[in-house]
Image: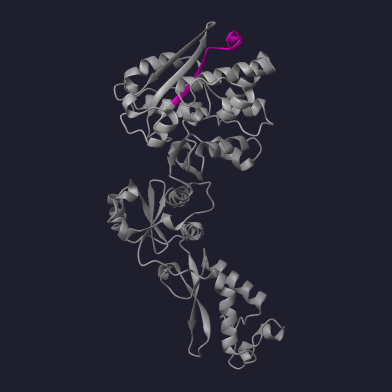
Amino acid sequence: MNSLIADFPPLAFVDIETTGGHAERDRITEVGVLTIQDGQSDTWSRLINPEIAIPLNIQRLTGITPQMVVQQPRFDEIAPEILMQLKDKIFIAHNARFDYGFIKASFKRMGIDFRAKVVCTVKLSRLLFPHQARHNLDTLIDVHGLAVSARHRALGDAELLAQFWQKCIAQFGVQRLQAAVQELLQSPSLPPNIDAKLVEDLPDKPGVYIFYAENRRPLYIGKSNSIKSRVMGHFSSALTIQKEMKLAMQIKDIDWIETEGEIGALLLESRLIKEKLPSMNIKLRRSRDLCAWQLRSNEQGVLVPQLVRHDHLRPGTQEQLYGLFYSRREALQTLQSLAKKNQLCEGLLGLEKITSGKSCFGYQVNQCFGACVGEESLAQYHFRLQQVLAKFKVSIWPYAGPIGIQEGRSLHILDQWCYLGSAMNEEEVYELLGSGKAEFDLDIYKIITKHLKKLPREKLINLQKVQQDSEVFD
């Protein structure tokens, strides 16, 4: 192991076993650490009582059973020992965000703010062996001929990482490995008022992030399947994109809210933007001028589009509704464009005043088939009009009542295309259903209709059934 320590600061090769993949919900069952410091290597490992059940698939993978850990210490009982193994060392792990995240979360529950310089051997492998197709630990074992002592046990896997480190030195030399480590450890370019510790805490999970300006004034709200990656994307783009540079210079603080997936992030983003009105969000702002066209028969039996304004708009229940539009101007422009493109009569559409028995202007320039003067039958005109408007038709709510979309542990409650909120248990479902009808929102309507088209049936929950089946939230 001598080559491992040449010209490097103290190192800790770390691996953990857990009850699952969620750092807040699951718990650590074993920690293994191989340390290199002051010319000496040492190993340390302990089983840990997670105080929760170990799933059978995890037991089969790791060989760690409830009987093995029931008499073992809890994490908080051996935290000082773990801290001693890791303190002031470079934390090296495979998929390091997982191991580091679990250990950091475990210390956090004790009120300890654990931080370390972290090197991920997945990223190190990608950097040094860019032509290698895969970089998981089993691949590294096969490619580099690593000696396996106890696969899927903490210390056994930590020892594999130390072997991989030694293989890297043997192949590339100390200086190249130092350069690779330095590249992985380099702090990203951050806005001047943002602490690197805050960025380090950003989760690599779906959710919504909020940038604040001076005095906690909401500046920008965004969503992503990886909050940390998206936020860092803003900061890296600030060097080349003017909008991002302006944003970075004003940021004073960052908040975030994790969600169970993409749908939850989209719904939450839309709602928060309308509530907080961040200054740099142009899209998804609340529109009080929302409107749509509704086909109604006049006294002559002609179907005429009538503009339904925000106060009288009930999408999901109103028949023959087409749109929706953010403003009257947008609605008129769309209808005029459709009329010209499809040679519909602008007189019958109400876009042009015409005298009974006389043609519209469009007929005179061959832009109308003549429904206004009887040359096109009213039935044919109505058929063409409805065909043209079909792609704009607002769907009637297709369910008997409220529904839920299951996403992870969350149930997104929807009714009449309105988003009532997300629930984590039955009590929250009842509370949301009893909170009154939510205001219709066009952005949320678009989110819901898009995702319902591709949503598996088993993810769509009948809320009457939920009231009788609490297992939905287990």
Q: Is residue 335 magenta?
A: no
Question: Residue at the spot x=50%, y=70% of the render?
Answer: 292
Q: Is residue 6 magenta?
A: yes
Looking at the rendered image, the quarter that the N terminus falls into is top right
Q: Is residue 13 left or right of residue 112?
A: right
Q: Is residue 360 above or below residue 284?
A: below
Q: Hey, which residue is sitting farthest bottom in the picture? A: 357
The image quadrant that residue 166 belongs to is top right
In magenta, the rendered stretch is 1-16
The image quadrant that residue 466 belongs to is bottom left
Question: Residue at the spot x=43%, y=28% of the render?
Answer: 62
Q: Position of residue 91 (x, y in %)?
A: 51, 20
Q: Is residue 205 above or below residue 123?
A: below
Q: Is residue 408 left or right of residue 284?
A: left
Q: Position of residue 110 (x, y in %)?
A: 33, 24
Q: Position of residue 448 (x, y in %)?
A: 47, 58
Question: Residue at the spot x=38%, y=48% of the render?
Answer: 410
Q: Position of residue 342 (x, y in %)?
A: 65, 77
Residue 285 visible? The answer is: yes
Q: Hey, which residue is sitting farthest top in the picture? A: 39
Q: How many marks?
A: 0
Asked which colour scheme the image uses, the reply is: one colour
* Of the pair 211 and 296, the residue shown nearer to us: 296
* Of the pair 177 and 164, the residue shown nearer to us: 164
Residue 348 visible? The answer is: no
Q: Is residue 179 above or below residue 132?
A: above
Looking at the rendered image, the quarter that the C terminus falls into is top left
* Of the pair 165 and 338, the residue shown nearer to us: 165
